[in-house]
Image: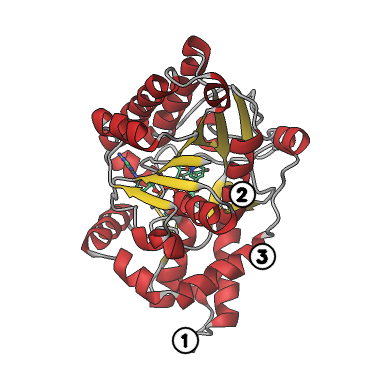
Amino acid sequence: MRVLVTGGAGFIGSAVVRQYIAETDATVINVDALTYAGNPESLGNARAHPRHVFEHVDITDRSALERVFREHRPDAVMHLAAESHVDRSIEGPAAFVETNVTGTHNLLEAARSYWSELEGEAQERFRFHHVSTDEVYGDLGPEGPAFTEETAYAPSSPYSASKAASDHLVRAWHRTYGLPVVITNCSNNYGPYQFPEKLIPLMLLNALDGSPLPVYGRGDNVRDWLYVEDHARALRHVLAQGASGRTYNIGGRCERTNLEVVHALCAVLDELVPDEQGRYARLIEFVTDRPGHDRRYAIDDTRLANELGWQPTESFESGLRKTVQWYLDNPEWVERVRSGAYREWIDANYARRGRAV
Ligand code: NAD
Ligand code: DAU
């Protein structure tokens, strides 16, 4: 099995690559542009493994993608490369349209041209797996039923709109050209190697620094949390077992308000690295909300459970503890990703927000 993974130096992609290398015989062709969010160090032992081939390629470069398909002849594609941070999409949407829409279009076209020349079983078994998000379904009220695969798309942010557009392209390439695709829409991931612009690692590292913990609005927005290694397993399972043309929602069965998440994180820190100045929750500050902030996401994963027999294994409590321990054990990784460019983003994003709303 030869899998072409895009975005394999990012948070979720690197977990997928590490698992393929450690737990299977697959060869991984890792296509990544190494943006601020990509880091080859996140690949761990997989980085130098003979079954891991790194291609430093931007998915907006169509001819480079065609070369990669010609040279490596993959059996399947798992497409994770994307601009992924909602707040950045609000400040600068263009990069999201470029990578998430144009980049996905390029990858679909390169895959279609390669796949159309395959023959027999190789052509039948080929898969293009598009990794997407629950944010394409939009905003749920507190009591609304969870998103199913039939929920109408209603994206709120430039990020989710660009992901919705890419999902539509993938479905159209299946219906019009017959390209064998699967799509997964997943909820919020957390775990080791997550870039510290996202809620959990940002709060964790701020707390260790004794810096404010900036909760947007009133902290009552709800997300469904899934441990990243569980997501990577689900992705590998769907790629192997999913039906062509089908969409599968993936969730953690773990809805929490942002404030609950931050308090849970502070409690783990209080236990593992007590601060003589007091409990970490004292650092919580309520700051100006994210424009267009979705109140709640919730995933109905019945299809994945019933048709493919998959469900998450990690509880939020155990996953959060593992995550905190990983960041405590890996200060070098943390220091290297918190470069000048990272500081600039943090300063700009939180200066804009001011303090208490
Ligand atoms: P990430 O931002 O950590 O990583 C993205 C990776 O893509 C990086 O390695 C980056 O270098 C690469 N990349 C970006 N632009 C590229 C380009 N033009 N060409 C090639 N490579 C490029 O993202 P993540 O959190 O690991 O998310 C991965 C995928 O999963 C995304 O498609 C995202 O929409 C989706 N997703 C994420 C979550 C989540 O909670 N993080 C949940 C559901 C779905
Ligand atoms: O739902 C899946 C999505 O989850 C993925 O598609 C995205 O790629 C991923 O970034 C994530 O999006 P969110 O916007 O939900 O994640 P983020 O970590 O940015 O924020 C989680 C919640 O925490 C959200 O309600 C905003 C809030 N928040 C975030 C930050 C960074 C804060 O209150 N303070 C903060 O400083």
Residue, disc 3: 317
Q: Earlier in the sequence, mark 1 or mark 3?
A: 1
Foreground disc of the pair 1, 2: 2
Circle 3 sits in a helix, a strand or a loop, which is it?
helix
Task: Say which amino acid is labelled 3.
Answer: Glu
Who's the residue at 62% across and 45% down the image? 234
Q: Are marks 1 and 3 in contact (CB under 8 Å)?
A: no
- Relative horizontal placement of residue 323, taking residue 292 as reference (left or right): right
Q: Earlier in the sequence, mark 2 or mark 3?
A: 2
Asked if labels 2 and 1 touch by Cβ distance under 8 angstroms, the answer is: no
Question: In the image, which is nearer the foreground, mark 1 or mark 3?
Answer: 3
Residue at numbered disc 2:
233
- Residue at 61 percent of width and 49 percent of height: 233
Say the numbered circle drawn on residue 277.
1
Measure how far apart labels 1 and 2 are at the Cα level.
40 Å
Residues packed near mark 2 inside 10 Å, few (<14), some (14 to 19) or many (20 plus): some
Which quarter is ligand 1 in? Answer: top left
On the question of residue 2 being in view, the answer is yes
Query: Please, is residue 168 above or below residue 262 in the view?
Result: above
What is the distance, in whole Å, between disc 2 and disc 3 at their CAs? 19 Å
Q: Position of residue 287 (x, y in %)?
A: 40, 56
Q: Position of residue 28 (x, y in %)?
A: 45, 47
Secondary structure of the residue carrying tag 1 is loop
In the displayed structure image, the side of residue 214 where residue 35 appears, left or right: left
Determine if residue 281 is in view: no
**Which quadrant does the C terminus fall into?**
bottom left
Q: Quadrant of residue 321?
A: bottom right
Q: Is residue 348 left or right of residue 187?
A: left
Q: Earlier in the sequence, mark 1 or mark 2?
A: 2
